[in-house]
Amino acid sequence: MMNKQQLTVVKIGGDIVDYDELLTSFYTHFKAISGPAIIIHGGGNKASTLQEQLGSVPVKVDGRRVTDEATLEVVTMVYAGLLNKKLVAGLQAKGKNSIGLSGADGDAVRAHKREVITVDYGFVGDIDRVNVSFINDLLSDGKVPVFSAITHDGNGQLLNTNADTLAAKIAVAMSSLYNVQLFYCFTKPGVLEDVNNDESVVTRIDKGLYKEMKTAGQIFEGMIPKLDTAFEALDQGVMRVHLGEVDVLSDNTIKHTTLCL
């Protein structure tokens, strides 16, 4: 059996991207990671702010952005442009040689426009495949790929894709070559028994406990799709999944949530 190298895949939420102080902390903790790593980032509030400045009203259903043609232009400019390059520049300043990417670059992530069932989400992409060899070439060359959640369909159409899902799909795909640890980093220390008490971190959660907490109403709407996606990644070959604040990247003794099957 091949002895695989460890790969760290980190998804940072838009709430981190929004604040320079949190980003600076992220850079510091990310720098401590040894071995190859990949970053996937969310969009934060910048796209919504720009939409409003341009006279458009952001529309979300169940926390997911409805992406019409005008919205797609804005999120592509913000996610794949401003925020992606801001992250890359910050990482370069910490000595992490990074390359900013969308799913269209190097045909890295191919997706299709989500079918309309009950809601028409517009130009929202559901992922079909990840280009493992392209990403592995970057890692082998010592680069840190930094992905915005913009993908493409192979026919010239860009698509807005959920960043949590993109992180999980990349982690699963790369697990064919690496032992992958997936981190979801945001502004809470993990899954909480009491959403109003940051000290009530659930340090280990399996599917049974997750189901119990959902039934009891302890896990709220925004966290449910993240955890669903994270458990799917574990089922499909990712070795470990962690949720918490950015300091867990450099010190795994910091209180956080680890998923287990």
Image (cartoon, helix red, strand yellow):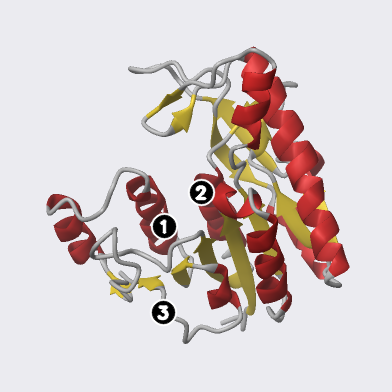
Whole-angstrom CA distance, mark 2 to mark 1, is 8 Å
Quadrant assignment, res 207: bottom left
Are the residues flagged by discs 2 and 3 in contact, CB closer than 8 Å?
no
Seen at 73% across and 75% down, the residue is: 31
Quadrant assignment, res 37: bottom right
Residue closer to the observer: 21 or 230:
21
* Residue 176 screen position, x and y as percent: 59, 64
Instruction: Answer few, some or many: residues within 10 Å of disc 1's Cα (few below 14, many 20 plus, some between 14 and 19).
Output: many
Q: Is residue 139 visible?
A: yes
The image's mark for residue 255 is 3
The residue wearing badge 2 is 164
The residue wearing badge 1 is 230
* Residue 195 screen position, x and y as percent: 29, 58
Residue closer to the observer: 198 or 8:
198
Instruction: Answer few, some or many: residues within 10 Å of disc 2's Cα (few below 14, many 20 plus, some between 14 and 19).
Output: many
Camera-side mark, 2 or 3: 3
> Going by the image, does 160 lie left or right of 135?
left
Q: Quadrant of the image for the N terminus?
A: bottom right
Camera-side mark, 3 or 1: 3
